[in-house]
Amino acid sequence: MYNDLVSLGKRESSIDMSSTAVTADSNLLAAAGPSGVDGAVGVPDAKWFVAIVNPRHEKAIADKLMNINVTCYVASQKEFRIWKNGRRKTIDRVVIPSMVFVHCSEKQRRLLVTLPYINRFLVNRSADSGGLNKPVAVIDDKDIQKLKFMLGQSDHHIDFMPTPLKVNDSVRVIRGSLRGLVGQISRSSDGSHKLMVNFQLLGGASVSIDPHDVEKIAEISGNKK
């Protein structure tokens, strides 16, 4: 009986500590006002930022952020795995390690970066800020939607590269689950083809594609500043 009560007390203490942490984080954000709204002028200004977190903790941290009413997204793709022992399971593979996309105002971002599980926010190294410090990277809504579409609809494994891609023909997918997606096509040494899709500031993703499922279009203009 005594051991049972001690065990129960430990569990309750753990729950209380977790609840206290969530409450503290929520109070921290409450000071910044409603999500996505500039308190001074009342103009919605929520943007997509990229929180850098410890590897293999992306989903757990996204859950913590959602518990304090922060909109976030982890780029992941469902895959079917078969282990050597014959075990089969569908997993949710994180495609961009150590990154959690966070949709909030700049004021809230400055508070979020103080949380112990947020290491820092991605900066735009290509921007000229006129000083040593680079501005925080802001991801375009279209890139977030394109990323979600690509990861949600593709039947093939998608790889993500941290540097922009330089390939040849610009194409549009005309059939299949990725129909409408625009990117560039390349040919591998083994003769297979891949569709390369660039994401401003993030890099690029590649996925296997049948050349019969795409059509060549005029060269895609880059993002000009």
Image (cartoon, rainbow, N blue to C red):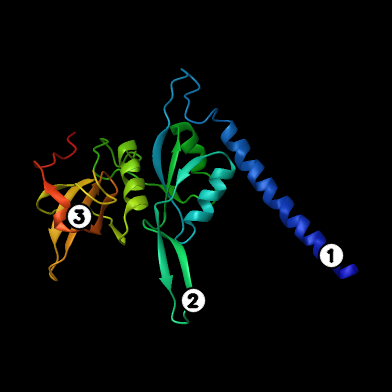
**Which numbered disc flags the more N-terminal residue, 1 or 2?**
1
**Which numbered disc flags the more N-terminal residue, 1 or 3?**
1
Q: Secondary structure at mark 3?
A: strand
| Residue on which the image places disc 2 | 87
Number of marks present in the image shown: 3
| Residue on which the image places disc 1 | 6
Q: In the rendered structure, which amino acid carries the disc numbered 2?
A: Arg
Q: In the rendered structure, which amino acid carries the disc numbered 1?
A: Val
Q: Secondary structure at mark 1?
A: helix
Q: Identify whether 114 is placed above or below 77.
A: above
| Residue on which the image places disc 3 | 195
**Which numbered disc flags the more N-terminal residue, 2 or 3?**
2
Instruction: Answer whether residue 150 is visible to the viewer in this image.
Output: yes
Which residue appears at 49% of the width and 35% of the height? 108
Cα–Cα gap, marks 2 and 3 = 32 Å
Give neighbour class at mark 1: few <14, some 14-19, many 20+ (Cα, 10 Å).
Answer: few
Give neighbour class at mark 2: few <14, some 14-19, many 20+ (Cα, 10 Å).
Answer: few
